[in-house]
Image (cartoon, helix red, strand yellow):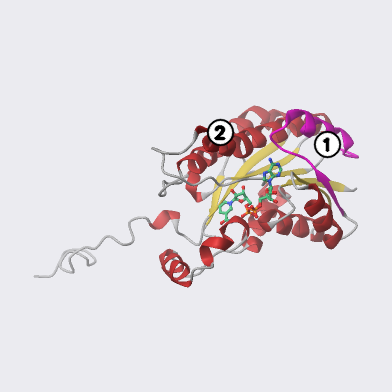
Amino acid sequence: MTKWAVVTGAAHGIGAVIAEHAVKEGYRVAAWDVDGPAVEQTARDIGEACVGSAVDVSDEEAVREAAARLPQAPHLVVNNAGIVRFGPLLDLPVTEWEAALRVNLTGTFLVARTLAKVMAEAGGGAIVNLASINGIAAAPHAGAYSASKAGVVRLTEHMAMEWARHGIRVNCVAPGLIHAGMSDAIYADPEVRRVREGAVPLGRLGSAEDIAAAVLFLGSEKSAYVSGQTLAVDGGLIKSTLASLPRPASVDSVGFAEA
Ligand SMILES: NC(=O)c1ccc[n+]([C@@H]2O[C@H](COP(=O)([O-])OP(=O)(O)OC[C@H]3O[C@@H](n4cnc5c(N)ncnc54)[C@H](O)[C@@H]3O)[C@@H](O)[C@H]2O)c1
């Protein structure tokens, strides 16, 4: 049986790698992106199992039309399309705030619910939403992005709860420090890269492949009993926020401190 996957934001970066991995795992892939020519080229590069189309995930009508063009209900939907808007909250223009929420949160909502209706009729499937560790912890000048991604985390939980009875599992992947896509510019600076890498317990930046592997796991039968979860794929970073806090050697020992 042919299985279809829809991957949004698939023209560039992590989304393009997710689409490529999905094809390797046997899916036919509908690759959607607001950048039509780029996603068509990416799909051609991946091969004939991948079809690219121009779709703005924040435009409900465009999402409906793209969903209607799918040859069958998807087994897997990956809400990967996203934009970043940095800036201090005191000065951030409301247009920037709204842009981040519109694409990252509303776009995820529109694509997920449009396709969930089709998947429900077909007996179910899996949805994987891309959040970020910024949706879990605060970072300087990332308020709009963080709020939108925290929204994706919570929206995932609501979708999982409401759509379980339709056989739809919904989970979230929260990438950490990833050397791909929108973060490439950050790691162009060697000193910034060194400091950031040094903060990751596993000692390296993540790759788009690391993220694709987690997404495809959550889309597969191997995670058949997992729903409503957010999986941080971050080399241990988000669970190590206390790592740099010192303790005196006198109390930092097993059992009682030696005199
Ligand atoms: N790269 C990272 O370090 C990182 C870290 C955490 C989370 N993420 C998340 O992973 C996802 C992919 O990020 P990336 O690094 O590959 O970014 P990217 O900028 O390389 O790719 C994002 C893609 O989304 C598309 N897009 C933007 N607005 C869209 C819209 N309205 N409709 C359809 N497509 C749209 C872009 O054209 C682009 O192809 C995003 O959701 C991002 O927030 C990335």
- Between 134 and 185, the one lying in front of the other is 185
- Please provide percent x and percent y for residue 234: 51, 58
Residue bounds of the magenta highlight: 50-73
- Between 207 and 121, the one lying in front of the other is 207
Q: For marks 2 and 1, give the CA distance.
A: 24 Å
In the picture, the quarter occupied by the C terminus is: bottom left
Name the amino acid, label 1: Ala
Visible residue check, residue 156? no
Name the amino acid, label 2: Glu
- Asked whether residue 70 is drawn in magenta, I would say yes
Quadrant for residue 60, please give it. Answer: top right
- Please provide percent x and percent y for residue 136: 46, 45
Which residue is rendered at x = 57% and y = 43% of the image?
229
Q: Tag count in the figure?
A: 2
Looking at this view, name the residue that lies furthest to the left.
Answer: 259
Vertically, is 191 above or below 63?
Answer: below
In what element is the residue under mark 1?
helix
- Asked whether residue 175 is drawn in magenta, I would say no
In what element is the residue under mark 2?
helix
- Between 36 and 167, the one lying in front of the other is 36
- Please provide percent x and percent y for residue 15: 70, 53
Vertically, is 75 above or below 240?
Answer: above
- Going from the N terminus, do you reach mark 2 or mark 1 first? 1
User: Which of the numbered marks, if any, corresponds to residue 98?
Assistant: 2
Mark 1, residue position: 66
User: Which of the numbered marks, if any, corresponds to residue 183?
Assistant: none
Vertically, is 211 above or below 204?
Answer: above
User: Mark 2 near ligand 1 (CB under 8 Å)?
Assistant: no
